[in-house]
Image: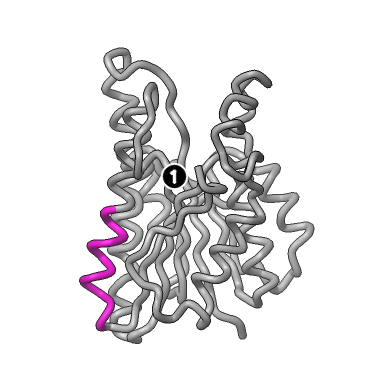
Amino acid sequence: MGKTCLLVGASGGIGVAIAKQLAKDGMQLVLHYNQNKEAIEQLERVLPFESVLNVMQADLSTNEGIQTFLSQTHPTYDAIVFVNGMAHNGLFQDTEEDVMDQMLSLHVKAIWMITKQFLPDMLQRKTGHILLISSIWGEVGASCEVVYSSVKGAQNTFVKALAKEVGRSGIRVNGISPGFIDTKMNRNLTEEEKKAIIEEIPLNREGLPDEVAHAVSFLMDKRSAYIHGEMMTVSGGW
């Protein structure tokens, strides 16, 4: 039996790519999604039957949704990969408090609570991987994405702090900060806006979800056994 991985936020472009890559690597997956059931059903059709242990739905932007998630999950995992998230665009002074609460719950509290539930088992077994997909904005910040940048920055600090706490117990914690990746999140941009961003990127193109998934595969593999508490940037040099 392969190792088990809880993939939180499996229905987005990067989540789907990660699921396919980890299944190829021989992992058995529990797939979480919130709204995009169609993407999960399509993913199940292309993955080997034995690769998917379970599928669950929960809205992690609410306390109730977090509790629903925790009540559904498998008792033990070898790895947890967090890909859950949503962007929020707009001036900071126009951002409503309920949006701030949703962003904090989805990007920060949900990760805290899910990790807290499954960390004791990893500590007892002295093995495990915890991996977060953050964003380059968590490192450098972005105008009109202040709240999103803030919660991604919190994720980055969580990776570094938790890594120091659990490393001696055989648990590795890392993160990936994607840059401009060809996903639905960026498809609301005009062609002119996309062109302007790509001109800033030294490799002169968008990244692909598969390229993020390859980085995940590497960080979950024994080849990266001495990489711990790191945020790997996958941005084409941006």
Residue drawn at (40%, 39%) of the image: 137
Which residue occupies the extreme right position in the image? Answer: 46
x then y, percent, for residue 178 = 50, 48
For this view, does 74 lie left or right of residue 125? right
x then y, percent, for residue 46 = 78, 59
Residue 149 lies, with reference to residue 70, above or below; the image says above
Residue sitting nearer the eye, 47 or 176: 176
The range drawn in magenta is 157-168
Residue 114 lies, with reference to residue 197, above or below; the image says below
Three-letter code, disc 1: Ser
Residue drawn at (43%, 75%) of the image: 76
Magenta span includes 97: no
Magenta span includes 159: yes
Residue drawn at (66%, 48%) of the image: 208
Q: Of helix, strand and loop, which one carries label 1?
A: loop
Crowdedness of circle 1 by 10 Å Cα count: few (<14), some, many (20+)?
Answer: many
x then y, percent, for residue 50 = 70, 74
For this view, does 28 lie left or right of residue 102? right
Residue sitting nearer the eye, 220 or 204: 204
For residue 60, what is the image quadrant? top left
Q: Quadrant of the N terminus?
A: bottom right
x then y, percent, for residue 230 = 36, 64
Residue 228 lies, with reference to residue 92, above or below; the image says below
Count of marks overlaid on the render? 1
Residue sitting nearer the eye, 195 or 11: 195
Residue 133 lies, with reference to residue 29, above or below; the image says above
Residue drawn at (62%, 45%) of the image: 203
Residue sitting nearer the eye, 2 or 195: 195
Can you identify the residue that label 1 sits on?
135
